[in-house]
Amino acid sequence: MQKDRFLSQLEELSTKFNDTKGNGVTRFSWSHTAALAQSWLEKEFSRMGISLIADGAGNLHAHYKGKTNLPRVIIGSHLDTVRNGAKYDGTFGLVAALETLRSFREEGFTPNRNIEFIAFAEEEGANFGTTCLGSKLITGIVPPEDLTKLTNNDGTNAWDLLEDHDLAPGKLASQQIDPHTVHAYLEAHVEQERRLFKNNYKLGVVKAISAMRSYKVIYHGESVFAATPLKERKDPVLSFIECHMEIQKVIASGAFPENTRFTVGQISCNPGTPIMVPSECIFTIDIRNLEITNLPAISEKIKAIITKVAEKNGIGVDIIPLSRSGGVKMSETIQKAYKDAAAELGFEHFEMNCGTAFDAASMGTIVPSGLLLIANQVDAETGEKYALADDLYNGALVYEKAIRQIASE
């Protein structure tokens, strides 16, 4: 693998296609910017004589021919970002996979198994609040017909949005992955937490990915003018504040299983007018725990608190499921391939569980999967995360070596 070319292409894909230059990276799935990034990938694969084809969800697929028709190896990551996201989120894994295949082609290496490259769409869930949607659709976790139930802030459902971008969601049922035709899925990604940094490691081999559930909650109050006396209001924002504080208090008390995580990531009010009490307070909640069996009970307890606050304050409430994933153990065979590759190249590694949702969690529900993480450094003054060029390149070398081993089996 050529270091300069890898780092140059990583920099180009990570920064060139960005709607918020100078303020992180924003590249939502199915946007004009994502289409430009797709064109970039298409050109790079065409230089190898390989076509890049989109499925009905906008996941991008390319195929590298092996010696046999044994079950294939899938590699890749995601192309989208959150708003103002980290520079190499998703793109590191894509460019590492691209450069791996390019290196194989240049050295004339033909693996025993076919290799499929996938650039997943909507891993971040920025459009509809459902993480890893692209991988969930082609693994069968989310049935294609459920796309009509997912709506964005403009009220557009996911099915219509896909069709508006010349995609064919109606073909997704026939495009789902048959587990019997896949030997393994390998993903590489920059770490989203800080465990590698805190433990002074550059590479992490993931043993398991935490389970997660997310919901949209709508508190329904009454919109009145700001002059209305406080005691006459049914303010949904107050219920949100009370609810949030109560949940944090219960978690801090130890009433939930160890390592339970609860996050409010998005809040909005209707109408969003400075001189009006809102009629609605809308927010999302994300609940995580390493053990998927813990999630139902945790979720029910949190939903009970949400409902109890609404009843106490005399307002209505809707709790709408958005996403569920994770609770998946990574393949021990692929973990060993990562660890062996790191050792052969002279790099130390850290074995860890992961609390972040990745496409490897979706893929891991149907095929043996493995996730390699590369450390982010953390600026002592600003807290900003950034990955070092040498760490990215060394991680890509480990990824390439592991892919070579698994695809040669």
Image: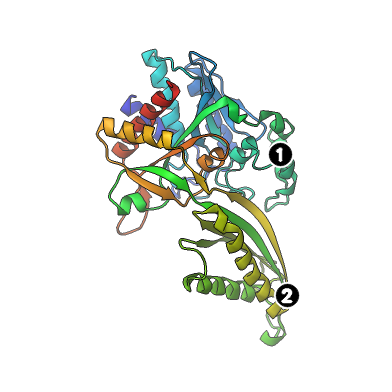
**Left or right: 1 in relation to 168:** left
**Left or right: 400 in relation to 119:** left
Q: Quadrant of the C terminus?
A: top left
Say whether residue 243 is visible. Answer: yes
Q: Quadrant of the N terminus?
A: top left
Given this view, does label 2 or label 1 mark the residue nearer the observer?
1
Q: Label 1 sits on what residue type?
A: Pro
Q: Residues within 10 Å of mark 2 (few under 14, many from 20)?
A: some
**Left or right: 238 in relation to 343:** right
| Residue 80 point in image, percent of width and height | 54, 41
Q: Label 2 sits on what residue type?
A: Ile
Secondary element at image label 2: loop
Q: Which residue is mark 1?
A: 144
| Residue 359 point in image, percent of width and height | 53, 40
Say whether residue 276 is visible. Answer: no
Q: Which residue is mark 2?
A: 315
| Residue 245 point in image, percent of width and height | 54, 74
From what the image shows, is residue 96 above or below residue 372?
above
Residue 327 image label: none
- Residue at figure coordinates x 72%, y 73% from the top left: 221
- Residue at figure coordinates x 68%, y 50% from the top left: 152
